[in-house]
Amino acid sequence: MRSLIVFDFDHTVVDENSDTWVVRCLPSQTLPDSVKNSYTKGRWTEFMGRVMSHIGDQEISPERIRHVMETIPFTAGMTDLLTFISENKDTIDCIVISDSNTMFIDWILQAAGLQAAVDRVYSNPAKFNEQGYMEVRCYHSHDCDRCPVNLCKKKVLELYLSEKSDGGVEYEQIFYVGDGGNDFCPTSCLRGHDVVMPRKGYTLEKLIAKLEAREENPSLRARVVVWSSGTDILQEVRATMQS
């Protein structure tokens, strides 16, 4: 029997926002107000396109961007957790669903030697164009009114589980690990014996607490286990696998 661990990335696997960390590659380590103030709610990926365009205008090389991204700190205990997952691939599948981008995530995992832990990354596709500018595209379009226009994590998770089921894989247990508001939507497709793990003090924990305060909350069936470090998650995964 297999288990699935689903990770968000920013403020979950890494202890920062990778999209704002990239600004450190600029000499001033800050964005001009014209770019900074151009963000529209729910349209972060379009905003990041403008950020990367500005970085390209400053003639920052792809190598410089990659070097800076590789310095982002992992959340405490997370490298141990990912190492454990990579050593137990016979029973654990692991995916990342993130509103960052594929290039940042791949670079960061590769630099830490942890890419073997993650089977698939679902994030906004990124590449460098012929001018050396990074381009970021929206992951998909969807009709969920609770999620940013470029990514509904519930839709991604449901499609992944459907593909696996078609291939004969049914997960005995799913662990969903995240921190943000966009991690709330996918929790509704978890079952009673699955585990949703919100990071302590972050938006996802607050949203779940609000839901649990209601007398009826049919949209959340999974068990809730709050975490502060990767060590907490590792303990929960180990205990569940041994029970």
Image (cartoon, rainbow, N blue to C red):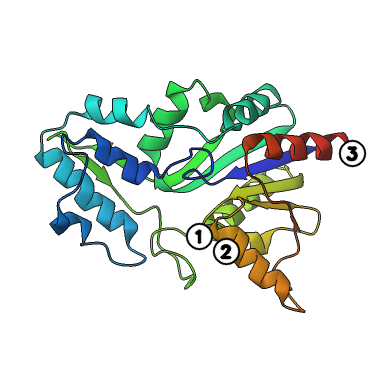
Query: What is the spatial separation of the Cα atoms under label 3 and label 2, in whole angstroms?
Result: 28 Å
The residue nearer to you, when weighing 210 against 189, is 210
Badge 1 crowding class, 10 Å Cα cut-off, few under 14, some 14 to 19, many 20 or more, is: many
Residue at 49 percent across and 70 percent down: it is: 144
Residue 72 x/y as whole percent: 40, 32
Residue tagged 1:
182
Give the mark, 1 or 3, whose residue is nearer the N terminus: 1
Residue 117 x/y as whole percent: 59, 28
Q: Is residue 216 left or right of residue 68?
A: right
The residue nearer to you, when weighing 95 against 81, is 81
Residue at 40 percent across and 45 percent down: it is: 17
Residue at 63 percent across and 25 percent down: it is: 86
Residue 34 x/y as whole percent: 13, 58
Inspect the image, locate mark 2, and give the three-letter code of the amino acid beneath it: Cys
Where is the C terminus found, in terms of image quarters? Answer: top right
Inspect the image, locate mark 1, and give the three-letter code of the amino acid beneath it: Asn
Which element carries disc 2, helix, strand or loop?
helix
Of all residues shown, which one is farthest toward the bottom? Answer: 215
Which element carries disc 1, helix, strand or loop?
helix
Using the image, tell me which numbered label, if any, was put on residue 185.
2
Q: Is residue 110 left or right of residue 211?
A: left
Inspect the image, locate mark 3, and give the three-letter code of the amino acid beneath it: Ser
The residue nearer to you, when weighing 5 against 179, is 179
Badge 3 crowding class, 10 Å Cα cut-off, few under 14, some 14 to 19, many 20 or more, is: few
Give the mark, 3 or 2, whose residue is nearer the N terminus: 2
Residue tagged 3:
243
| Figure disc tally | 3
Query: What is the spatial separation of the Cα atoms under label 2 and label 1, in whole angstroms?
Result: 6 Å
Residue at 48 percent across and 22 percent down: it is: 112
The image quadrant that residue 221 belongs to is bottom right
